[in-house]
Structure formats: structure tokens, C-alpha cells
Image (spheres, grey):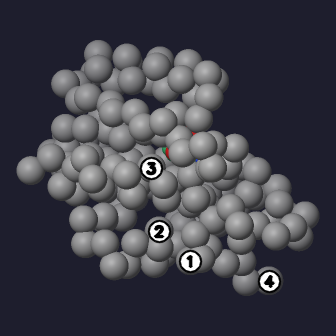
Amino acid sequence: MKRAIFPGSFDPITLGHYDIIERGVTLFDEIIVAIGVNASKKYMFSLEERMQFIREAFKDEPKIKVVSYEGLTVDFCKEINVEFILRGLRNPADFEFEKAIAHTNRDLAPIETVFLLTAAKTSYIASSIVRDVIKNNGDYTKLVPNSVRVVK
Ligand code: ADP
């Protein structure tokens, strides 16, 4: 069985992430969306909210699981016996950043990183932009799955 983890902050999940996960499901038997917990980082949404947004978005897709983890992604992969890391690429900046991480991960463990190119229609979407829109009371609903709703 081919399983991949899709690690990230998902603060919150966007239609860009959603697209990568939906397409990843055609390549793998199981996708584990793994929210990395970094104690020194400030998030807009709590871990529970971020997990719930993703669970709700994929509630009809049994091949997608949602978990959280601490520490190195490769250590978590070994712990749950996963051989692939799935990541999305939007632009050259993503590529440079992801390349360094993927090479480092390969030095640390025999785990392959598989990249999917963003869909053209979601290529501009980033969680940081969604957070800015939310903070400034803009209409963020076009950028995220329906499960992401802000209660004020
Ligand atoms: P991180 O904290 O690792 O940057 P993110 O939640 O921002 O976590 O992103 C997780 C993954 O999703 C990364 O591989 C990132 O490149 C990818 N991603 C984010 N937005 C998009 C998008 N619009 N299209 C494709 N991939 C995306």
C-alpha cells in the first residue's frame, strides 16, 4: 500500500491545499494530512480548528486521514511507516525552499518527496493571504473549502 503524508501548517487549509490533496489521492492509497505543531509559532486557528476544517472538507473521502505531529517530518514518517512526502509547488520560491528541505530529508531518511504543481486556478492562494483577508474582513470564502468558516 502506497501512503504519503502531506505536511504543513494549514492555517487554514485553502483551495490550493485541497487541490493537491484531491490529486494526491489518485496517486496514493492513503494521504495523511499531517499538521506540524511548532510551539514557537503563532497560529490564527487552533490545532483543533485546523484539523476539523480538513476533516470536514474530506468527510466523504476514506483515503484521507488528518493527524498532528511534533518534531521532524522524517521522524514522523518513520514512526507511522510512511515512505512518501507530498508537497505542492506554486512558484520558483516554493521550488528553492522545497528543494533544500527535500534534499535534507533524503540525507536523514530514505523517504521520497513527491511534488505536484499547483493548479493554475489556485496558484496564487496562500494561507498567509487568506489570514490577511480574514483580518481585514474581506470575503475569504472563495479561497478556502466550505468547511472553513470564521465565527466572530
Ligand atoms: P508550511 O507551513 O509547510 O508552508 P502550508 O500549510 O503553507 O505549510 O503548505 C503546505 C504545503 O502546501 C506546501 O507544500 C505548500 O507548497 C503547499 N501549498 C500551499 N498553497 C498551495 C497552493 N495554492 N497550490 C499548491 N500547493 C500549495
Left-right relation of 132 to 100: right
- Measured as percent of width and height from the top left, residue 44 is found at 70, 62
Residue 69 can be seen, yes or no = no
Q: Quadrant of residue 151?
A: bottom right
Is 81 left, or right, of 67 in this rendering? left
Does the residue tagged 3 have its C-beta within 8 Å of any atom of ligand 1? yes
The answer to whether the residue labelled 2 contacts the one labelled 1, judged by CB atoms less than 8 Å apart, is yes
Determine whether 22 is above or below 55 in the image: above
Q: Dot 4 corresponds to which residue?
A: 152
The mark lying in front, picked from 4 and 1, is 1
* Cα distance in 3D space between marks 4 and 1: 15 Å
> Mark 2–mark 4 contact, CB under 8 Å?
no
CA separation, marks 3 and 2?
13 Å
Which secondary structure, mark 4? loop
Q: Earlier in the sequence, mark 3 or mark 2?
A: 3
Nearest to N terminus: mark 4 or mark 1: 1
Q: Residues within 10 Å of mark 4 (few under 14, many from 20)?
A: few
Residue 119 x %, y %: 54, 45
For marks 4 and 3, the one nearer the N-term is 3
Residue appearing at x 80%, y 66% in the figure: 134
Question: Mark number for residue 54?
Answer: 2
Identify the mark nearer the N-term, 1 or 3. Answer: 3
Q: What's the mark number on residue 147?
A: 1
Which residue, given by chain and number where applicable, does mark 3 sit on?
Answer: 20
Pinpoint residue 112: horizontal percent, then vertical percent.
26, 29
Horizontal side of 37 relative to 151 (left or right) equals left
